[in-house]
Image (tube, coloured by chain):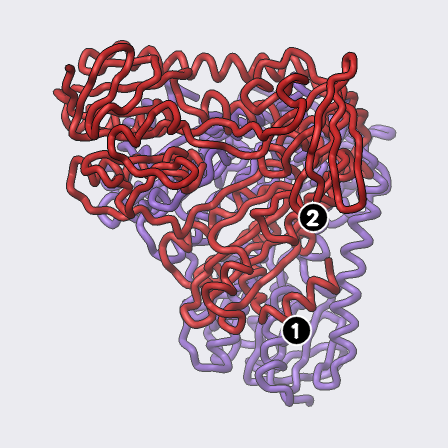
Chain colours: A red, B purple
Amino acid sequence: MSKYDAIVIGTGSGMIIAERLLRDNPDSRIAVIDKDMAGGICLTKGCIPSKLIISPAEVLYDLENLSEFIDAEVKGVYFRKIMERMRNKVDSESEMIERSLKELDRMDYFKAPAKFISPHTLEVDGKEIRSEKIFIGSGSRLMVPKIDGLRNSGYLTSDSLLYLEDMPESLVIIGGGYIALEYGDFFARAGCDVVIIEMLPRILSNEEPEISRLVHQELSRHAEILTSHRVVRVEEKGEKKTVHAKGDAGKKVIEGEEILVAVGRVPNSDVLQPEKGGIETDERGWIKVNDYLETNVKGVYAIGDANGKYMFRHVANREAVVAYMNAFHNAEVRMNYSAIPHAVFCHPEVASVGLREDQAIGKYGRENILIGFEEMKSTGKGQGLNAKGFAKIIVHKESERVVGAHIAGKSASILIQEVATVMSLNAPFHAILHAIHIHPALSEVVSWACGNLMSVDDYHKMIEREL
Amino acid sequence: MSKYDAIVIGTGSGMIIAERLLRDNPDSRIAVIDKDMAGGICLTKGCIPSKLIISPAEVLYDLENLSEFIDAEVKGVYFRKIMERMRNKVDSESEMIERSLKELDRMDYFKAPAKFISPHTLEVDGKEIRSEKIFIGSGSRLMVPKIDGLRNSGYLTSDSLLYLEDMPESLVIIGGGYIALEYGDFFARAGCDVVIIEMLPRILSNEEPEISRLVHQELSRHAEILTSHRVVRVEEKGEKKTVHAKGDAGKKVIEGEEILVAVGRVPNSDVLQPEKGGIETDERGWIKVNDYLETNVKGVYAIGDANGKYMFRHVANREAVVAYMNAFHNAEVRMNYSAIPHAVFCHPEVASVGLREDQAIGKYGRENILIGFEEMKSTGKGQGLNAKGFAKIIVHKESERVVGAHIAGKSASILIQEVATVMSLNAPFHAILHAIHIHPALSEVVSWACGNLMSVDDYHKMIEREL
């Protein structure tokens, strides 16, 4: 049995732990395990390839908003070139990571599945390896729902989509979350016939209802969106696949060249078998951790998708640092999830941090929160770009802290950062008001929303009038 | 002689003072004076109309950066429609302000030039008016340099340009500052032949040299840029104007359908005659104020362009609040200019806050500052958009405060805000590092630059290698 100073499972954010340990203690012996391409989901299957694919959609959306003023004819996208660029970047970065893993003498790299056999021992590639410090960053994988006929007809996932050579002429997307929306938005704008089928009453159901509504409205110009529809059966009919969906109003039959399944992710615990190591998981298989990211087994930590908390690379990166500090420097740092922003790169773009309105009301009471709101089109830059969308800021009255912010529209993923940083500093909402914002930049929308606080009731009266 | 509780000269940011006074004390009698269109320079001649005109340039630039992947043919812009939208928005907003000025009983609105006749007394429209509290927000106007033949040949300014019906086929721009660059960038991308002539060795000479270089390089694909050239003579030749410029390497003769003069602004003190009121101005005519924005005459304040400090609407708005608080609430608030961001809406977009590198070295010493740097293309979103540009962060070593930040590239005017807000909170640079940034959003460029601090010497070695 080989013994290591640390075992890192997964080469996504886990690499941060390996790198820090080698930097702080160059004599450390580390085992790094990844059954898949080096670099983790984000680099190899997730946010990076998807952003490389969908980026033209942003320009096409902006162009559409200014079509009155720009004389341009858009014929489509060069899909093969887009896919080629994406694969080149992903492959070269993954290879670079793999090379660095192989080059280091003090590091053993196992490109194979691992499974626990006892609390600090794993079996990988026929070997038993052991460490007092194990970091589980084993990620997640796509969930494929049990739908009659789906497996037979064949389908794309956000994994297999990366190997498409040509753009399908039509695409039926099962799911209405962020992956469904980012790809749906891109393919629809690129000229593919897209139908999005969401089981719940609205797309992006984790976002504020106002955001779902705006995105639905904007995307509907290019794609068909069916909400409250459940896919019950799929058939293959010649070159096409036929999707049968059931809604309150009856049945729908949709034909498409391809089906994209984007309904969520599941843990890799069936492969890793944490239970053999005495490591507790929740009922869905996500590994349970305490505030310090340690599992119930001392010295074993879980970060990233594996712990099932926030499946974002930026969260996993922070968790990696926290777990490392706690494991090797007795830092006793609690992972703080209070100011974690996220974005959906559809168009209008969506970004959010903290609590939704319903969550804030649930936590603090309706009378104890205030809501600020401003539309993009109120700003000079927003007018210039014919930008749709808004910023909604939720403030806890007594503490004067922003507890949530939700932005839809141009550059939402950047605009949200000012709020996230102020929340992370635990500064009051007027920190944003006091900071001078460039006139007339889009960033004014955030500060004006903060200057515009009203009761929950007044807010709802206002948006009924305005939106 | 009419007596007022306040006299406000200018209907730009000065309106904030009038509004606050009426809100806090509805019985106040206020005189508001503006010889020009209501709304101030920003709304009627400056940032708002310019952003409404130039906004298509952003989309055209983004499209150009992704031309490999998007199959689109850009034929040009619909110039008349652009100008029409701009004039409609500006006129309707200005009329709204004018209407509100006329409607209020307690407000006397003089649409005429005013001049001081004694410390608290002005003459306007043949009347003498007096107040213990006078707020000078009289703005500035364009400077027209003394160039042989210029007046005879005729020229555009950023004022008269707003009345263009058709886009000129060719345009010679005298000046290389932000107005020259914003319009130069737009007209060049819209299909006009543009030549920019700057007297100094680089365009945007108030920005970091790295920024000037990048903008020069990018804009050169569409416009000719002559630096270190002084325009010595202008002639009219039939339909064209001929501009004679002199550089180190010799003379240049440039022909153009129109000339745009954009070399800076001068005060309106010749009209207002503050010296008749005993109010001191500097040698150029800008009104001198102390930290509380009060002039040497008690109760007389100067805000906005009139005090010659920062000619940005967002600064004037803040100055208006500070002057109001000091005048009516004895607040003794000092105007804080330490975290004032600004942007140039050319492409790549430019934004900056605080000190430049040379200023930071001058103030703190070369060994006491650190510089952080990151390129847009390091981020996933930046790669997706083929975004050029970078973020440069200047930190004072001992205090760990960001003392300056300079960003060129996509969404710079939004990206700078996180830094400006952290500076305004007087939080250390690691507030940015500790805040979680969305991966892979462009905002990562700011946090990575902060995580990347090095000595001034190392920075220069690095950029010589990389840029």
Q: How many marks?
A: 2
Q: Amino acid at mark 2?
A: Leu
Q: Chain of mark 1?
A: B
Identify the residue at the far front of this view: A148
Quarter of the picture holding the C terminus of chain A:
bottom right
* Residue furthest to the left: A27
Residue A9 x, y percent position in the rendering:
31, 24
Q: Circle 2 — which element? A: helix
| Pointer 1 and pointer 2 on the same chain | no
Q: Name the side, left or right, on which A86 lies relative to A313.
A: right
Say which amino acid is labelled 1.
Lys
**Quarter occupied by residue B223:** top right
Q: Which residue is mark 1?
A: B115
Give me the residue at 41% from left, 34% from top: A305
Q: Write the residue at 75% across / 85% down.
A: B105
Residue B296 appears left or right of A117: right
Image position of A50 with respect to B422: above or below: above
**Which mark is drawn over residue A214?**
2
In the rendered structure, the residue with mark 2 lies on which chain? A
Which of the 4 image quadrants contains residue A79?
top right
Q: Residue A324's mark?
A: none
Q: Residue at x 47, y 73 (%)?
A: B294
**Is residue B232 in sight in this rendering?**
no
Q: In which quarter of the view is residue B451 placed?
A: top left
